[in-house]
Amino acid sequence: MIAVAKVKVKLLTSRVNDKDSWVAGDVIEVDAAEAKALLDGGYAEPVAATKAKRASRAVKDEAETR
């Protein structure tokens, strides 16, 4: 089985297929060839890869009362 690279893009227009529908502004993950077609056609823009945020330690707020 060949692994297909997935790319995230932000849609600039609505899109529909036989299973799903999306509206402009939705971020979807598609294979590289489809992403290229969407980007070249002006139907989507690339989404920059982001690093996961590191969890910070919770600080107990002693002033909080309920």
Image (spheres, helix red, strand yellow):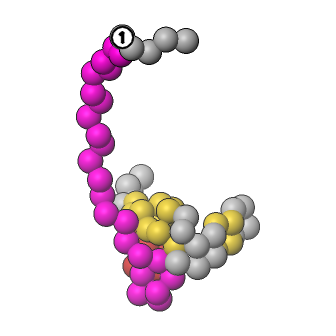
Task: Give the residue at x 41% y 76%.
Answer: 45
Q: Is residue 66 positioned above or below 11 on the image?
A: above
Describe residue 59's horizontal placement relative to residue 21 as left or right.
left
Our reading of the magenta stretch's main secondary structure is loop
Count of marks placed on residues: 1
Return the x and y of residue 7 as percentages of the image width and height: 39, 63
Looking at the image, the residue that sits furthest to the right is: 18
Q: Is residue 1 positioned above or below 23 on the image?
A: above
Task: Give the residue at x 51% y 62%.
Answer: 28
Q: Is residue 46 magenta?
A: yes
Instruction: Work out which quarter of the rendered image holds the C terminus and state it.
Output: top right
SS at badge 1: loop
Residue range of the region highlighted in magenta in the rendering: 39-61
Task: Give the residue at x 64% y 74%.
Answer: 15
Q: Is residue 56 magenta?
A: yes
Describe residue 6's horizontal placement relative to residue 66 as left or right.
left
Task: Give the residue at x 69% y 62%.
Answer: 20
**Amino acid type, residue under disc 1 in the picture:** Glu
Instruction: Answer yes or no: is residue 31 visible.
Output: no
- Compare residues 11 and 37 and report the one nearer the observer: 11
Describe residue 47's horizontal placement relative to residue 37 as left or right.
left
Q: Residues within 10 Å of mark 1 (few under 14, many from 20)?
A: few
- Compare residues 35 and 65 and report the one nearer the observer: 65
The quadrant where residue 64 appears = top left
Instruction: Answer yes or no: is residue 27 visible.
Output: yes
Describe residue 62's horizontal placement relative to residue 43 as left or right.
left
Q: Mark 1 highlights which residue?
A: 62
Return the x and y of residue 23 as percentages of the image width and height: 63, 70
Q: Is residue 29 positioned above or below 24 on the image?
A: above
